[in-house]
Image (tube, rainbow, N blue to C red):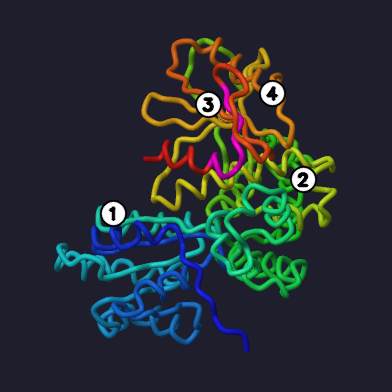
Amino acid sequence: MRAKEYIPRDIELILKDVVDSFPAMAITGPRQSGKSTLLEHVFRDSHVMISFDDPVIREQAISDPKLFIENCGEKVIFDEIQYVPEILSYLKILIDKNRNKRGRFILTGSQQFNLIKNLGDSLAGRIGLLDLLPFSILEKTKVRFLKKDFINTKAYYVHSCLRGAFPEVVMYPEIKIKHWYAGYIQTYLERDVRTIYNVGHLREFQQFLHLLAIRCAQILNLSSFANDLGVSVNTIKKWLSILEASRIIYILPPYHRNFGKRITKSPKIYFLDNALVCYLTDMNTADNFFTGPLAGALFENFVVQETVKHFFNKGLRPRLSYLRTHNNAEVDLLIERGLEIFPVEIKLTKTPSLNMARQIEKFRSNFTKLKINEGSLITLSSNKFKLSRNVSVLNMDSYLEYLDVISC
């Protein structure tokens, strides 16, 4: 039997502070992102863990939630709370009896939309909220056979596409990736999509997931998906909400300020795990990742997902967007901090050229009223250097350092 290994998570740096600031704390994220393992490790000496994945325990809580809560103990972790929303109103009663008692209840769930809606109704102002996504690239370097310097090689990117970032498949390379992702999607469809969201058209939903993967990092066209699948636009909107709530995808909005310019108003779709995209599109060799028809989109997907993880692991909700105007000004990613904007272009290349800085320079010249900082061009180059007056080339390691500065 293999020993259970624990990989420290970046979110640990803020986790206890959030728990100590509220009577309750909820941590959401996709299935298998490591929520239970994280909480079990950090709070093993202070909290009792109760999992509603267990059908017997779940039935006990549903049949008499008041009695169940009263018998749980003083400090409790409720795992997979989305299965028993009935207990939330009773948690509120206990919390309101002593609002100054911090860190009493910790909740986890893999369905952010339903969970947050129920928490908002029952525990508004009484609960801190965090998201745990699969491993970031920095977290992966803590795995015993992956090293820090692998970030600045092509190997880190190949690994993200072949193995992804879910802790189990990263930590145990003997796991067959195709079987794991097949099981993951089937479990997700049956336990979340069908059971929680009552989606009856599972075959069409799964086809939608495949189509989204093929079109990752592209501007969303709702009508096109609806026509391809023979469903309504409202159905596509509902399915997108489910995938976003499950933290399977991230919806990147267009830059929204109105300066009298015609700006594309549809969002772009990114997956929060690269290997899931590769599994869904049957990309399974390194050649696909660098020269295939989805190669550029896949690298863009990777950089955006790492950006989202970086901010989420600090407990932040970043203001991220992209820009595309009708006169062809286009920037892959805009990061806002206050009134400042940090433009980011993403190119799958090891040999950046001056022409690749053109869109950021165009953005600066077209939007002179904005406070635009120096832009970054993220590539597979192993070095960082100044490409033009207003644009620097960053490798992945230096980009993560750059994000650290922005998120301070």
Of the 4 image quadrants, the one containing the N terminus is bottom right
Could you say which is closer to the camera, residue 108 or residue 317? 317
User: Which numbered disc, 2 or 1, marks the residue closer to the eye?
Assistant: 2
| Residue highlighted by disc 3 | 255
Could you say which is closer to the camera, residue 228 or residue 8? 8
Image coordinates of residue 201 in percent, x first then y, are 71, 58
- In the picture, measured across the screen, residue 27 lies left or right of residue 250, that is left
Q: Is residue 329 magenta?
A: no
For marks 3 and 2 on the same chain, the one whose residue lies earlier in the sequence: 2
Decide: is 202 above or below 295: below
Q: Residues within 10 Å of mark 3 (few under 14, many from 20)?
A: many
CA gap, disc 2 and disc 1: 39 Å
- In the image, the segment drawn in magenta is 391-399
Q: Residue at x 77, y 67 (%)?
A: 178
**Helix, strand or loop at mark 3:** loop
Image coordinates of residue 393 in percent, x first then y, are 61, 30
Q: Which mark is residue 124?
A: 1
Q: Which mark is residue 356?
A: 4
Q: Name which residue type carries label 2.
A: Ile
CA gap, disc 4 and disc 3: 21 Å
- In the picture, measured across the screen, residue 88 lies left or right of residue 222, that is left
Could you say which is closer to the camera, residue 150 or residue 402? 150
Q: Residue at x 70, y 33 (%)?
A: 347
**Helix, strand or loop at mark 1:** loop
The quarter of the displayed image where residue 397 is located: top right
CA gap, disc 3 and disc 1: 30 Å
Q: Name which residue type carries label 1.
A: Ala
Q: Are marks 2 and 1 in contact (CB under 8 Å)?
A: no
| Residue highlighted by disc 2 | 214
**Helix, strand or loop at mark 4:** helix
Of the 4 image quadrants, the one containing the C terminus is top left
State the residue lying farthest toward the bottom.
Answer: 1
